[in-house]
Image: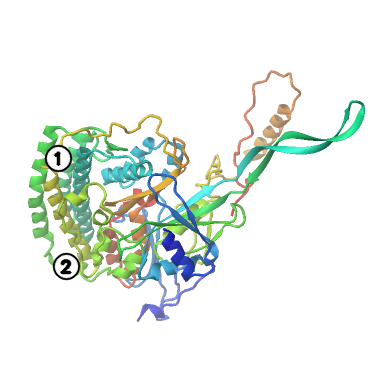
Amino acid sequence: MSLAETKTERVEGWNRAPVIAPDGEGELLEVAMGPHHPSTHGVFRMDVTLDGERVIWLKPVFGYLHRNHEKIAEGASYLASMPYTDRLDYFCSLTNNWAYALAVEKLVGQEVPERAEYIRVILAELTRVQNHASSIGFLIQEMGASGTPLMYAFKEREKILDLFESLTGSRMMCNYMRFGGCRVDVSAAWLDATRKVVAGLPQFVDEFEALLSTNEILMARCQGVGVLRPDLAVNAGVSGPMLRASGVNYDIRKVDHYGIYDRFKFRVPLGDHGDIYDRYMVRVLEMRESIKILEQALPGLPAGPIMDAKAKIRGFRPKPGEAYGRIEAPKGELGFYLISDGGPNPYRYRVRPPSLINLTILEDMCLGHNVADVVLIFGSVDIVLGEVDR
Amino acid sequence: MEEIKAAIEAAVPGAGVELVLNPSVSAQHSLRIAPGRAVAVAMFLRDDPELAFDFLSNVTGVDWPDKEITEKVKVTHQVAKTIDGVEQTVDETVEEVRKHVEPGCLEAVFHLYSVAKKHGPLVLRMRTVNRTDQVELPSLTQVWRSAEFQEREVFDLYGIVFTGHPDLRRILMWDGFKDHPMRKDYVEPDDFEYEPTPHDEVLKRAQERRDKEQAAPAGTTRPPVAPAGNEGTREQRPVAE
């Protein structure tokens, strides 16, 4: 029974779910997964039409966490929007801050001192490690592992969040980057604590891999499920670990050469098949590459200021113009597009959310699979609703 | 950038491409394309082996509202004047203040990158005719699938209708929502979940009474009354759909 034989009722201007079963017998089951659902990573709904257990139609519905971030930014000054960016992808607030700071720095041509660049890289890679660990932990949880691997991941994540808290004052809503550098300098004690945490990370990833990568259940449920072809991935604007798991070699750290990533040696892991297992492996390997970057960045941290002395903080009015700045966030390509009209507030402030755009091909990946696989495929996309809805 | 413009004009005749310079330091200049041949231009940009812009990174909506422009213009009139007892027609130059409204429009901005060639960004812009009734632009979803949700969002928040989009409906706001929230002239209703009640009659009468009192002759020392708000006036507000 191929999908092409599915009869679909199409009403003008609205893509309606099919109501006639493909083999003409029985009815199809329409299920709304969410918005209150333990496995939807937040308030997210999927309207799924099932033929038995198989998915033949899936539409994601979101907007439940829409907080009007872009319009608020039009009424607030550039710096006032920085705490709001923490709350976009609330797992990775430091990378959100960096992306916004990068876009504004591009808009005005602001330079960033070297020490601040090193600190930015260190914090971004720590963010990446804890994000990938949580993402894998949640994926395993959705497979039915009932919390224990998730808590292994969170144990490590808590160590990293403790570092964030002692440096920035907050575990998750850090509000740390500024246009032209960082808010607060790192102390020697903090660097010692970070070195200890980073020293313990390789063993954590080894344990994680030993526990999970050759696990029968994980392999059976993830290999061959939710395959995403590389050409479709590129055309659908997919970015981040999901794109690289499909075999496309595109890492913005290597392509755009932003920050000082060119100074560090690290590889870009690629997948072969584009299934959930490849996405899991790409995330594990990216954690290892992030640890490598941390091990190179921590010893090389130079002395100096953390904020450009000529950075304008009060009365910050960029000249009219626009800029698009993007970084490789743990979820994908996080971009900020700013149009300035010369005033203290941006004329247009746009967040390019990787989670939303990675969801474009959710239906394509889920068609033909079972409902249980939908949960896993959705978990492997690794979205955060704060970013999808803004 | 000029080479890309020349290449587009060579490949797609009648494309209507113009270069829009970006005055900021970022030097990310853009190309404004006419909506008529936009899909052909997009396909050329994607399929050309040199350019290979296969990755649509970002679709943004921008609202440029109507601008009222006031300018002082020197106007020469012919005026009949009496000079030294003789009636003559004399040219008199007077400075007049003229106001006109430059119509606004909605704009969609596309950021393109190339995964194959690792270059970018190329910024494309498309403008609608006006902000009220002619708000259609061609959809680029058939060229780049990533436009699917992003064009829905621009439709939802700005009201640009993308013709040819497979499933154009609201994405962030709920289905019954009226108006387009990211527009510069958007006014929130006082009550998003308004339902008519018997109190509405009483409220309307009170508002009429208050408006009559506001029109009372000058000299009253009443404190200024707040203008009638839009309590429950969802039906009365102009619906821009």
Q: Position of residue A356 (x, y in %)?
A: 36, 56
Task: Name the residue beneath numbered marker 2.
Answer: A219
Task: Inspect the image, locate mark 2, and give the three-letter code of the amino acid beneath it.
Answer: Met
A328 left or right, relative to B210:
left
Tell me if mark 2 has few (under 14), some (14-19) or many (20+) residues whose alpha carbon lies within 10 angstroms of its own.
some
Q: Nearer the viewer, residue A223 or B164?
A: B164
Q: Position of residue B66 (x, y in %)?
A: 60, 45
Q: Is residue A368 above or below residue B83?
A: below
Tell me if mark 1 has few (under 14), some (14-19) or many (20+) residues whose alpha carbon lies within 10 angstroms of its own.
some
Whether residue A349 is visible here, answered yes or no, is no
Q: Nearer the viewer, residue B230 or A277?
A: A277
A223 left or right, relative to A339:
left
Task: Name the residue beneath numbered marker 1.
Answer: A301
Q: Residue at 60%, 53% (x, y): give it.
A: B130
Q: Are marks 2 and 1 on the same chain?
A: yes
Which quadrant, please, contains the C terminus of chain B? bottom right
* Chain holding disc 2: A
Q: Mark 2 or mark 1: which comes first in sequence?
A: 2
Q: Quadrant of residue A213?
A: bottom left
Whether residue A321 is visible here, answered yes or no, is yes
Q: Nearer the viewer, residue A75 or B209?
A: A75
Q: How is the image coloured?
A: rainbow
Secondary structure at numbered mark 1: loop
